Image (cartoon, rainbow, N blue to C red):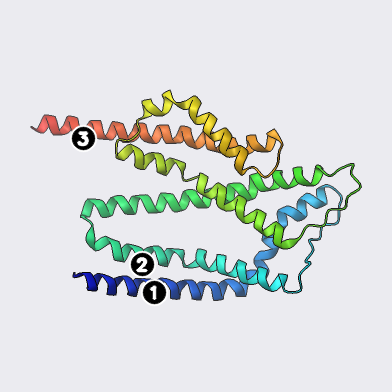
Amino acid sequence: MSFFEHLGELRTRLIHACAAIAIGAFVGVGVAKHVIGFVMKPMVVALQAAHLQDKLINTDPTGVVSLVINLGIYLGVVIASPYVLYQIWLFVAPGLYKHERRAVAGFIIPSVLLFLVGIAFSYYVILPYLLRFLVNFQTGLPLTPMINIDEYFSLVLIVLLGVGVIFELPMVILILSLFGIVTPAFLWKNFRYAILVITIVAAIVTPTPDATTMLVFMAPMILLYIIGIVVSWAVLRRRSGKELARQGAS
């Protein structure tokens, strides 16, 4: 294909991807009101556990409309993401060798699964604990929690996406291992430095100042790093096996 043919192909894929996102956003806006209750549930449960009023507030006349639209767009991106990834694949795959296509396909599915597992872990484990701490921290003070729905939604989005990205750590280590940039021996030797980096990252991303919440963020990152060491070891073992088989064949 010539340069302009590539541009034409890229334009076609972009149009299809944007159309899919638009359709997904339309569907997302339609179901957003039902999803809002699901997003609010951890906050409501935390308020109920503290025997407080389990209602969130809206201080902007257009706040609910903006929330529904924003949530619908996010849902639209999620709904359309498989088709968008497929369009990216259709554009990239013709320029790859067969083994490269298998490798890329092998990366996409685990990456998506890890991201979804990270979102689920943050929603069902991290977020409830975090919200309970934030609500109970006000105990004994002459304050009445009045949680703004927009600010709460922003907090939830940061936590979910942040943890989802963190769960991609094994895939990052896998890619670095495939290129020979890191080895399991290197990862294990620098384990204590990794703990230091994880502690700093957890301190930055943790929205509360207490050490317990920071440990809740640190625990999965340390586990993911250890899983990354195992993945790197598997890559090195497979590579060594191929080299021995090649030497035996020669």
User: In the structure shown, which secondary structural element does the residue marked by tag 3 occupy?
Assistant: helix
Residue at position x 25%, y 34% in the image: 239
Disc 3 from disc 2: Cα separation: 33 Å
**Dot 2 or dot 1, earlier in sequence:** 1
According to the image, label 2 marks what residue? 87
Q: Which mark is residue 242?
A: 3
Q: Nearer the viewer, mark 3 or mark 1?
A: 1
Q: Which mark is residue 16?
A: 1
**Residue farthest to the top, as pictured:** 189
Residue 94 versus residue 142: which sits nearer the camera?
142
* Amino acid bearing label 2: Gln
Type of amino acid at the residue the image marks with label 1: His
Disc 3 from disc 1: Cα separation = 41 Å
Q: Is residue 197 left or right of residue 240?
A: right
Q: Nearer the viewer, mark 3 or mark 2?
A: 2
Tell whether label 1 touches label 2 (CB within 8 Å): yes
- The relative height of residue 155 versus residue 59 in the rendered view (above or below) is above
